[in-house]
Image (spheres, rainbow, N blue to C red):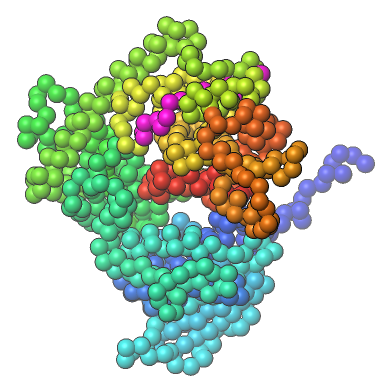
Amino acid sequence: MTATESSSYGASDITVLEGLEAVRKRPGMYIGSTGPTGLHHLVWEVVDNSVDEAMAGHCDRIDVTLTEDGACEVSDDGRGIPVDKHPKYEDLTAAEVVLTVLHAGGKFGGEGYKVSGGLHGVGISVVNALSSRVEVEIDRDGTRHAMSFGDGGELKDRLVATGDSPVVDGEAHTGTTVRFWPDPTIFDEVEFRFQTLLERFQMMAFLNRGLEIRVRDQRSSSTVETEDPDGWVSFKYDGGIIDFVRHVNASKEALFGIVGYFEGAETIDDNAHEVEIAFQWNTGFNSDGLHSFANGIATREGGMHEQGFRTALTRTVNSYARDKGILKDKDDNLQGEDIREGLTAIISARIGEPQFEGQTKSKLGNVSMRSLVERVTNERLAEWLEEHPGEAKAMVTKATNAARARMAASDARKAIRSKSLLDGAGMPDKLKDCSAKEPERRELFIVEGDSAGGSAVRARDPETQAILPIRGKILNVERARIDKMLKNTEVQTLITAIGAGFADEFDIEQARYHKVILLADADVDGSHIRTLLLTFFFRQMRPLVEAGFVYIAQPPLYSTKVSNRETVYLKDDAAKDAFMAERPNYTKDFQRLKGLGEMDWDELRDTTMDVGSRSLLQVSVEQAAIADDVMSILMGDDVEQRKNFIVTNAREVQNLDF
């Protein structure tokens, strides 16, 4: 047989997937994955349709229910999906087309929606294709209609009128209800996470002023507590993105009480362009508080609307500062990062034909939107500054201080580099290094105090384990400008020991250790030290965290001898209580090992540092995500959530069971 005969390739080998079959064959192409992200994407697709009705001015409330039998039900009081015959598919109603034909809907031209959030997705037909069952009820023109689907989008019951629509406040109700059961043969799991829904819908409510979104969990496994007798958790913000800014800044100290706001709109080539911006500065030092959205979609990679705001913000503030004499002729202009220090701003853009870029479709590419945002910000922000001189002066003063700190930080960077060059390897004197040369074999234990350092040095494997004692609680880098941070002795020691730089200059390829282990005491002070160190690594050496190189050690808080030969170590009070619950007649004493320095070096090695038996310790921050979505918090774009976790709740990481 010839090669040609054995590998024939003709027209009969071309497979054509009809209708929704393509979606079931390659679900990842349509919803990203068949894991939790893809599962919840189904909910977003259905709710997006209701939000589109709200943006068009036809919907006031959306109800989302997780039912006991595993379905998600989304109901709105919009106009209802059209129920008349479709002109192209004459044997199907418009509602049946929407549920069975890919890319069918009121968002692709016509008069259905001028602005839509659903263009980033794939439509309710994909939800139908990936569900084992779908039920739809439509109230329109005083009549209720119903239809159902099964087996991955197959039409089971044609759309029929089932009676009159219910009367609400004296009028016939209008709207659409969709219930769907995700297909367990498609998804890795089909259990929705209620907290994920709450976070998303709260954001949607902020972005759609006056829209009420209610969510409830009717599953027997639900742990949700609410004062509403029907179990609803409700989100409605009459202030819209002004309330959004207040929410983000709630745990921060505001520089002034007012939340600034302006908006603008124009039509370009029959394409609607709208933008609204809310902003407020706080006393913090971070400059990553800018959050942008396009048609309700979080544009995490920014885009033209964000670019237009940044450009206009820098220009307008510099112009104001010079006009008022705050910046002198000899002074350099403030840089964008100086002005954005402590800024929380929400940019919400709406556009008729959005163009999304990037792999994740989270970057807006419409150049016309950049022009609108830049023009509106130039005009309206200048007016706001003139109308609020006290707030404007406080903000500009903060920005000028940030500029001075930036220049001081530049000098401090040069000093650190020079010190490293002058001192050769530049390693801190108190670092007890290991002998291995390969970074992937090297471990750096960061311990509190010289006594703990002494125990750790005796307990370590000198070939692979290095010990770096630090003095007490390091500087809280969340509350300090970078110039002050770089002058801190402990921070300098950490930067020098790891050897890969910091902040934007950090190069993970130069890291001297592929395991950096935070080994703090088991008490509250030790927890605070862990938190401060986590904050430092996330802010200044983020690639180290993202690579899974940062670990948290879990030394025991108690030990007790259950026999002459066996000692049991317990990580905390909860573990001690569980131990006693299993042994109610246990009478032997417990030793509280609150300080590492109080532990014998062999105890420290056996419980915390022995590479062969790390049952009580060492879980990387990346692995922690498996247990409690820790990585999604640390790596997410919700700055407030991230800060709260790192600064106040990081102590919980080491208490998780992995």
- Residue 56, visible in the rendered structure: no
| Closest to the observer, 630 or 127 | 630
Q: Is residue 280 rendered to the left or right of residue 467? A: left
Q: Nearer the viewer, residue 370 or 164?
A: 164
Would you say 603 lies left or right of 269 here? right
Instruction: Tell me the residue at 56%/73% (across/down).
Output: 219
248 or 475: nearer the viewer = 475
Question: What is the x, y in percent for residue 399?
Answer: 20, 34
Q: Check residue 120 for magenta coloring.
A: no
Image-quadrant location for residue 382 = top left
Q: Considering the image in quadrants, where does the N terminus appear?
A: top right
Q: Is residue 354 above or below residue 653?
A: below
- Which residue is more in the foreground, 352 or 34? 34
Note whether 500 is above or below 612 in the view shown: above
Give, as a single range, the part of the protein colored magenta: 463-477
Which residue is outermost to the right? 1
Residue under the image location 49 percent in, 17 percent down = 430
Outermost residue toward the front in this view: 587
Residue 651 visible? The answer is yes
User: Could you say where residue 434 lies in the image, as x and y percent from the top left?
Assistant: 61, 18
90 to 500, vertically: above or below: below
In the picture, measured across the screen, residue 588 lies left or right of residue 76, that is right
**Among the 4 quarters of the image, the one containing residue 287:** top left
User: Residue 150 at what x, y percent from top left?
Assistant: 64, 75
* Residue extending farthest bottom: 163
User: How many numbered discs?
Assistant: 0
Q: Residue furthest left?
A: 324
Q: Residue at x 62, y 45 (%)?
A: 589
Q: Residue at x 8, y 49 (%)?
A: 387
- Residue 543, horizontal then vertical, whole percent: 50, 32
